[in-house]
Structures are given as structure tokens and as C-alpha cells.
Amino acid sequence: MRQLKIALFAAVASCALTLPAAAADGERFDGYTLRVKLIGGAQYEPLYTLIPQWEKAMGAKVEVISRKSHFELDREMKQDIASGNIDYCAFSSHTNFAPQYAVMNQPLDDLIAADTIAEFAPLVISHATVNGELMSLPRHSDVSNLFYVKSLYEDADNKARFKAEYGYDLAPPETWAQASDQAVFFTAPPNRYGTHFAGKDEGIAGRFYEMLVAEGGALFDDDWNPTFNSEAGVRALNWFVDLYSKKAVPAGTTNYVWDDLGLGFATGNVAFDLDWAGWAAFFNGADSKIGGNVGVALAPKGSSGKRTGWSGSHSFSITKQCDNKPAAASFITFLTGHDAQMLEARTGLLPTRVKVWDDARAEFTAKGDSFMVEVFDVWGQSMAEHAFTPPLIPEWGEIANALWPKLQAAILGDMSSQAALDEAADEVREVMEDAGYL
Amino acid sequence: MTRLRRYARDHAVPLALLSPAVLVILLVVLLPLLFSFYTSFSNYRLIRPDSLWDWVGFRNYLRVLGDGDFWSAFGRTVLFLTVALNLEMLLGLGLALMVNRITWGQRTMRTIMMFPMMFSPILVGFQFKYLFNDTIGLVNNALQSLGLASEPIPFLVDRWLAFAAIAFAEIWMSTSIFAILILAGLFAMPKDPIEAARVDGCSNWQVFRHITLPFLMPFIYIAMTIRSLDVARAYDIVDVMTGGGPAGRTELLWTLIARTAYDDARMGRANAMAYFSILLSIFFTWFFFRKLMAARRHLGAF
């Protein structure tokens, strides 16, 4: 806690030093009140402690009119669009959902200086670009890699038994087939399961999607016809179905989403967990039962040789209706600035600025935190080489909602993988027809 | 026409005084109803305001008619209503009869009985989601510690256990509504017929079956009507506990409609579903009101 306070103080102090310089060549917004809607939640709030610094430097005030979880905020903004009641300037967005807000979303190309944009990782900027226009400034990125309980993999008895049973050495899995073997091997219910996965909502849809890509499949062909009910699709879905039928995952995993998974892994009941980097510091910290005993590895490969890497970035956008776009642009540039990203990077959130990757890594090295250095190495490689987003179209949410109940039905054994994917493909086809793609 | 004009002239003051109320009702009830009814014939999507004018005729209704997921949610909602209402009624009746016998501390007991109603349904949902969780849940933990189960029971995953779990939460929260209304009936009940029956040598069961119960029936039907409307739009508890899943095993009408309307932003189709669902509420209200009238006639109230 004390370390966190020192870190916070350092971040605030460094911003206080850098801000007036930044403001000197820009304008001030004296007396202006900037209305914003921000994503809330434990991971996201620390950044907002910096807002008073921007207010002081710009002579403006920030009024946070809504602070909700991503999905609640998403619903609220859809209602804002429907009612035409958009009386705020900036909002938290997400690259994978941004295309939905097209009617209210101001393109940023003329508002943010090109050299500022150039400081961000090109891949992440391309994820935030819709139809050639930059729709948001990425705040931090998400991609999943493997966390595992080190002691289980280092145990000599486990190694010998695994080798005897499966014929190869026990090590963090390189392929999803190996991951499947290991999940079954480590399972000893009710005290331990091999792994677990997000089993509902966009969680399972995204996990299936990345497995589909790793198996060499695709959601759509070039004309937007659904193609995920292919052989690759069935192979991808069967990975989840097999683990569930072999009871290598908790029976309740079909109801789990992110918090259930993160907290579950931290209790030490699961051997390995494909999860977001934001959990890293918590998993290896004092509040976790496996603190100091956590290893990380790149997400395994599918049968096509490609690694899973479903990705996206939390970001900030400006509304078309905003009455002071330069102020809003200054605000979101500040919240995605170097020092702001350093603050988030210290907890394991993945920066979107190239320099912050290096600086955060250097800071971890200086502190002797070799675990976080390893986390940044693994996730850095993943973000640079393996990350991909779902199709950046407004319908991604609907597609995910058409998929997940069918995926669950296959996982629970209510229908075969092929039948489930066929039904989902019919529903997705209807979504695409209604939206005018087909 | 002249009669109408004369009526308006003779009653100008009351009509003028009533008009704001009528206007407000038109504005806040009728207008949104008409609007939502119109949108059910359009391809209206929240994220594309122009789609409001995209008239698609009966397409939404035809799709809903042919949508297996919708009809299984419809059927499940009817089953949920039937199970929840009947169990709540039986338990509420039992509770009320017992509390009615208490002579000391009855008021405190009545207050305690109403505790579950004081919680927000969302909190009740979280409470039972935690209790029934398969790995960290209290129920599974207790069963395993007592040696009654060796493996965790997936209460919120298994088809019927999950249904039972959400019904349990709903019943836990709302049984007291029945208990309070039936208790009010018991308080209002005249003592003479019961005393007369006892003098004539009726057994306890006969008194209950032929005097107490018929007298309570109107109260029970009022509670049934209120609760049927409540349960038919059950959402919070189910959404928190299972979200309608897994694989639609606990999907009720309103979890489906809310997802279609807000997560999928397909307001047109969601409204078509909602209009089908309203039929269900209208049917149950009509059914229980008919029963209520019959029960009152039976009592000789008319």
C-alpha cells in the first residue's frame, strides 16, 4: 500500500512538473466545464486521480456525469444516441465497440497532432481506426496470455507422472492440444481444476473467436457470409466442449466472467489461466494465495500454428456534439499521456505508447521486480506479433450475443458442436442481413 | 352531436379540471405505448436513429412467431409463474395461519416476516448467486463438509437445479406478500361462523376447508394478480444469478427482451416480443380477476 502511495505521489508530482510546459504552447480553457462519461471500476479509477492536475493547468473543470462499468456505459450511450441527448464532450470507449457509436463519435485526425498520434503503437492506432478515421485515443490494451502456478509445473513427481502418461515433458503448453492434456492431468476436484474459461456473454464468444482464428478459421468470408460453422470452427469449439465433458474445468464455468476467473485463479484452485495482464500484479501479490508462485507464458498455438490473441483497447473519444472540442482533445490527450500511462502500467495494464513500454519495463527492472519484467516481455511480444481484434463493425456485440448461447449449448452437451454453430450462423446471417451487409 | 356539445357545456368546469390529468396520462402512458407499437413494425436500432423510419411491416412479428428461443422463454416464464405463485401461496398461507395463532410478540413477528421484501431484488440475486455457487458457494460447502456430496453440485448450471435456484430466490423474497395479505384476511374474518361450526361439531380441517379458506380466497386472488404481474416481468434476480443462461436454460421473457433491446440494440424486434409478452400478463390478470369475482360471489358479497 505504501509503495502504491509513493508511486501515486511520484506520478502526480511528475505530471505537475510536465503539465505547465505542455500547456504553455497550447491554449487554456479558463472557466470552462468539460462534461465527460468515464468507465468505472477498480482497474480504471486510479487514472482519474490525475484529473485535478489537468483542471489546474487548464483553468477548467471536469464534471464526470456518469461512471459505470463498460457494459452499463454501453447501454447508456445507446440510449443517448436513440434519444439524441448527447450533452457531454468526452467518453470512455473501447476499440471493439467504437463502431457502434459512429453517429456520435467525432473523428480525431484534425484535433490531435500527428506527432502525438505517432507516439502510439501503430497496431493499436490501426485498431482504433474505423473506415480510415481515428475514432479514439487508446488508453490501455488488452490481450490474454497464460498465467500458471509454478510449483505445480516444477514438482518432480508431477513431471515424472506427466511424462509417463503423455510421453512428453511437462512445461507450460506451447499448443492448445498440450494445454488440454495438462488441464486434464492437473484436475483433482473439488480442490483443483486444470483451468477455467469465461463461459458467458462476450467472454466465451471472444474466446471462441480467437480459438477459431488459431485453428485457421474465420468468422466471415470477404462478403460477410458467416463461415465459422466450418471444420475449423468445430475444432475450436470442441476444445471447450472436451474440457467441460472431461470435468477439467469447474461445472460453473459457463456462468463465469472476468472477476470470477481472476479471483478463482488467485485462490490457487486452478493450474493455469488464460487471462488479461491487468491481473498480473494482483496474482503475484500478497492478497493472492499463489503470490510469488506465478509464471507467465505466451498464449498457446492452435493447430494452424497461429497463437490466440483476441485483443482490443480501452480508449477515450470525443462527441460530435461537443461545444469545445479543443478542450476535450486536450483532456483525452492528457489521460493517455506518458505519465498517465506509466501510472496504469505499474498495475500491469498494457500501455499504448511505445515509450511507456520501455520506461515501465526499465522501472520494474530498477525495482528488481523480475515478475513484472517478464509480464511486460510476454505481453509486449503478444501485442506486437499476435494480437488481433474482432471485425471492427457495429454489429460485433450482436454477433457475440448470437454466438454465446449456442456455444454454451454445445459445451453443456445440449447439442453437437456442428449443430450449435450452424444455428448460430443462421442467427448471425439474419443480423448481417438486417444491418445491410448481405 | 348537440348532446355532446350540451354535455360539454353543462360539465365545463369538471371537464376543464380533469383535462390536465387526462393530458398527463395521454402523454406518459399512451404516447410511449403508441410509439413502441409503431417501432415494433420497424427495423429500429438504437445505434442507428434513422432506422426508426425503416418500416418492415410484420417482419418482426413473423420472426418472433418462428423463433424457438422466444417460445421456449415464453413457456419457461409460464412455468416459472405457475411454480412460483403456487408455492408462494401455499407457504404464505401456512405462514399466515401460524402467525395468526401467535398471541405474544405477533407484531414483531409480522415485521420480521417482511424482511425479505425490504431487499432490492438485485441484492437478493447476488446473495443467492453466492449461496449456490459451485466452487465457493455456502450450500456446496455445507453439503461437502457434512459428507452429503463428494463433488460440487452445479446449482446454477444444471437445467432443473438452475430453474429451481431462481424460483427459490423469487419465492424467498416474495412469500411474505402472500402471508401479509392472507393475514389481513384472517384478521378481517368474522368469528361467528367458526364458533357456530364448532358448536355443530366440525373438525379443524372442516372449519378450515369450508369456512376459513373460502373467506380467504378473494385475498389470495388479489395477491395472485399482483404477483403474477410481478413474476411475469421477473428480471433482476434472474439477470444477476444466471443472466438467462447457461445455454438459455433459465431464459425468461424479460431477460431475452432486455438483451435484444439494449445489448443488441434491436428495439423494433424487442418491442414485438414485448407485445407478445403483454398478452401473457393480460391473460393472467383476466384469469385471476374472474376467479376473484367467482370467489366473492361464493361468499355472497354480491
Image: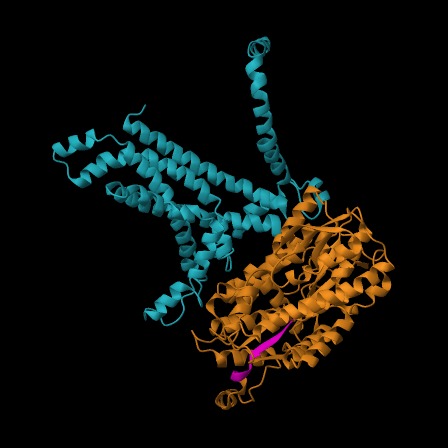
Tell me the colour chain B is drawn in. cyan
Q: Main secondary structure of the magenta part?
A: strand
Q: Is residue A276 visible?
A: no
Residue at screen point 57% across, 32% down: B29
Tell me the colour chain A is drawn in. orange
- Image position of A399 with respect to B271: above or below: below
The residue closer to the viewer here, A102 or A325, is A325
The residue closer to the viewer here, A264 or A227, is A264
Residue A149 counted in the magenta span: yes
Residue at screen point 61% across, 49% down: B262
Left or right side of A235 for A29: right
Magenta range is A144-152
The residue closer to the viewer here, A19 or A379, is A19
In percent of width and height, residue A279 lies at: 60, 70
Q: Where the N terminus of chain A falls, by quadrant?
A: bottom right
Q: Can you tell which quarter of the image residue A314 is in?
A: bottom right
